[in-house]
Image (cartoon, rainbow, N blue to C red):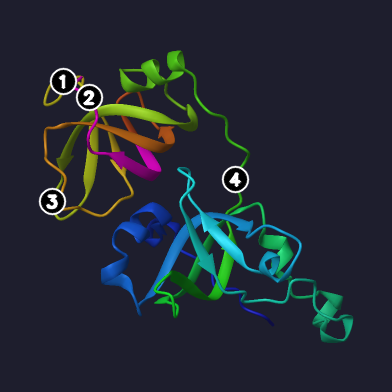
Amino acid sequence: MVHVAMYDASRAIDLSTLLEHADHLVRRLVTGRGHLRRCGGDGVGAMWPVLEDTQGRRLRVTPWLPMDNYSPRLAGPGGRHPRGLRDFFGHDVLLTGVLERDADGELVLVARRAQVVRELHLRRLDAAQLAAIAGVGGEGTVGYGALAGELIIDGGDQLRLVTADRGGPCEVSFTLDVLRRDDLVLGRPILVHGLIRKATPWLGAIRRAALAVDAPAL
């Protein structure tokens, strides 16, 4: 029997956060999250995948599987074949590897294993939807977009974005999947891009969060 190790997505580091903290993560085993794409072109470079975030930032990744499916002679019980690298392109993935720098000093993730994140294709939210989510409402809405608010920290390093009625009975806030950063000022207006999920009228989460520190005043 083949046992498949499932990732804990809550422990994965979004690519934008990984790149921001790269100097502290080099030569360490990390699990990053992003969208896997081909490097581009028809030559040898096309064999190199890149991990990309919602803002277009990229990290080169070493191939951890052959490009095509394995030979049928390697099929396991029941004729099931291990997947090839091409099956991961065009998907959000959780990718584990060691972060290194190549001879030119460029970052590269020496990949060891990956898992496709199975999610429906998510829409980009319009202004009306974002306004509803930022206030008391929008329960169950999921999609990409940006919300403005103020940052607070709930014990340890857990960041939240408060978008309405801070400290009041109708406070609306979103947990963020980013590490605490020294350049962030609590209570300062900020814009957060990412995958927004509004779980209740007052609470939500923003995954793959990217912080715009120099956001205009609210």
Quarter of the picture containing the C terminus is top left
Left or right relative to 167: residue 121: right
Percent across and percent down for residue 211 are 30, 41
Which type of secondary structure does the marked residue at label 1 adopt? loop
The residue that mark 1 highlights is: 169
Looking at the rendering, which quadrant does residue 70 occupy?
Answer: bottom right
Percent across and percent down for residue 159 are 22, 45
- Crowd around label 1: few <14 · some 14–19 · many ≥20 (10 Å): few
Is 174 inside the magenta-drawn segment? Answer: no
Question: Where are the magenta residues, as a range?
Answer: 205-218
Marks 3/2 in contact by CB < 8 Å: the verdict is no
Identified by mark 4, the residue type is Glu
Identified by mark 1, the residue type is Pro
Marks 1/2 in contact by CB < 8 Å: the verdict is no
Which of the numbered marks, if any, corresponds to residue 119?
4
The residue that mark 2 highlights is: 216
Left or right relative to 99: residue 38: right
Residue drawn 66% across the image and 52% down it: 90
Which of the numbered marks, if any, corresponds to residue 117?
none
The residue that mark 3 highlights is: 155
Identified by mark 3, the residue type is Gly
What's the CA distance linking mark 2 and mark 4?
33 Å
What's the CA distance linking mark 3 and mark 2?
27 Å
Left or right relative to 203: residue 107: right
What's the CA distance linking mark 4 and mark 3?
30 Å
Residue 178, above or below 191? below
Marks 4/3 in contact by CB < 8 Å: the verdict is no
Q: Nearer the viewer, residue 47 or 197?
A: 47
Q: Earlier in the sequence, mark 3 or mark 2?
A: 3
